[in-house]
Image (cartoon, grey):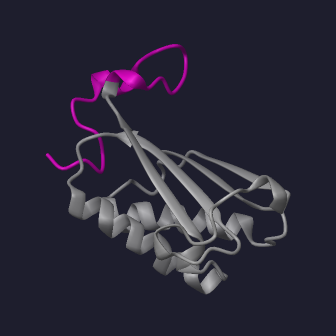
Amino acid sequence: MPLVRIDLSAERDNAQAIADGVHQALVDSIGIPATDRFQILTRHPAAELIADPSYLGVQRHDVVFVQISLVGGRPTDLKVALYRRIAEVLAPLGVRGDDLFVTLTENGLADWSVGNGEAQLLGLGTVPGLPT
């Protein structure tokens, strides 16, 4: 169950398509169920998005920040596959790989309440998309 926050320039006219692409990448690469979609999409004036233009040799111009919170436990190779798949899916939408900044924040089953003040994930035993 990921919670995805996408912050991008208000000048991008395809924000919804970018959100759709990020979700598709999660489904494709780490097995998130297609119906498990929770996203916060925020458009900002370009001046509010600050990213070093050449940190670690990446040449950034119009950064799209993608922050994904999810239950921990996926191996590194799946995380790397997710980063690559997001870049592949967003490239046709005009998001250059250099402009894509992705972070994952992992937590535990007890760290989620998806409604009614309950910790629903505790009762699942396993979480869809997590290796068993």
Q: Quadrant of residue 96?
A: bottom right
Q: Quadrant of residue 21?
A: bottom right
| Residue displayed at 35% across by 21% down | 110
Q: How many marks?
A: 0
Q: Taking 127 as reference, is 57 left or right?
A: right
Percent coordinates x, y for residue 91 in the rendering: 56, 83
Q: Quadrant of the N terminus?
A: top left
Is 127 drawn above or below residue 75 in the view shown?
Answer: above
Q: Which residues are magenta?
A: 110-132
Q: Quadrant of the C terminus?
A: top left
Q: Taking 41 as reference, is 109 left or right?
A: left
| Residue displayed at 21% across by 29% down | 125
Q: Can residue 20 be seen in the rendering of this structure?
A: yes
Percent coordinates x, y for residue 33 in the rendering: 39, 54
Judge by depth and name the residue closer to the eye, 11 or 57: 57
Is 1 drawn above or below residue 59 in the view shown?
Answer: above
